Image (spheres, rainbow, N blue to C red):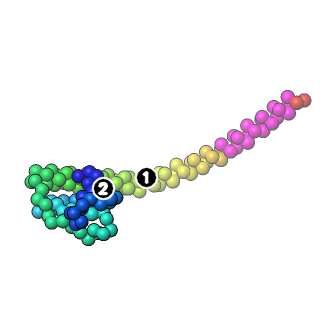
Amino acid sequence: MDGDRYCGNIGRAHRSNGVWYVLDLVSCTAVQRCWDPQCKYFSSRPITVPTFLCEQARADEDEEEEEDAAFAELDEQKATAAAASAPEMEKRSSLLDEDDEWDEAALAAAEAAITAARSQERS
């Protein structure tokens, strides 16, 4: 099916556009659809899909839904934790600002010491 270009609407392969299939897990059937603009609204007659494939697809779909729910719960927990830690983060931010001021003062003192040392070397 990968790379398939045969279109049931025109009875031949398209030159550049491929086809795709829509699987209906309730009726256990599939229909062919086409990417070509000429066949935009075409849908083949339903094709019966083996039951074991539908059952596997349903199981995969259920697993994906469970994973999505788990990720949604994790995102909610992260958001709650972030909201709870916001005041702590603000406190840390103000401490960083104080550190920045101290760093600037230390840098200015170091630059003054270097300048003084160079002046002494020149003398």
Neighbours of disc 1 within 10 Å: few (<14), some (14-19), many (20+)? few
Q: CA distance from mark 1 to mark 2?
A: 20 Å
- Side of 88 where 25 appears, left or right: left
When asked about the image quadrant of residue 114, the answer is: top right
Residue closer to the observer: 49 or 97: 49
Under circle 1, the secondary element is helix
Q: Can residue 3 be seen by looking at this rendering?
A: yes
- State yes or no: residue 115 in magenta: yes
Residue closer to the observer: 19 or 66: 19
Magenta span of residues: 103-121
When asked about the image quadrant of residue 121, the answer is: top right
Using the image, determine if residue 42 lies above or below residue 75. Answer: below
Give the label, 1 or 2, closer to the camera.
2
Circle 2: residue type = Ala
Q: Position of residue 40 (x, y in %)?
A: 29, 69
Under circle 2, the secondary element is helix
Identify the residue shown where x is 75% and y is 39%: 111
Residue at the spot of label 1 = 85
Circle 1: residue type = Ser
Residue closer to the observer: 42 or 59: 42
Q: Position of residue 69 (x, y in %)?
A: 26, 55
Residue at the spot of label 2 = 72
Identify the residue shown where x is 24% and y is 58%: 6
Q: Position of residue 102 (x, y in %)?
A: 65, 44
- State yes or no: residue 74 in magenta: no
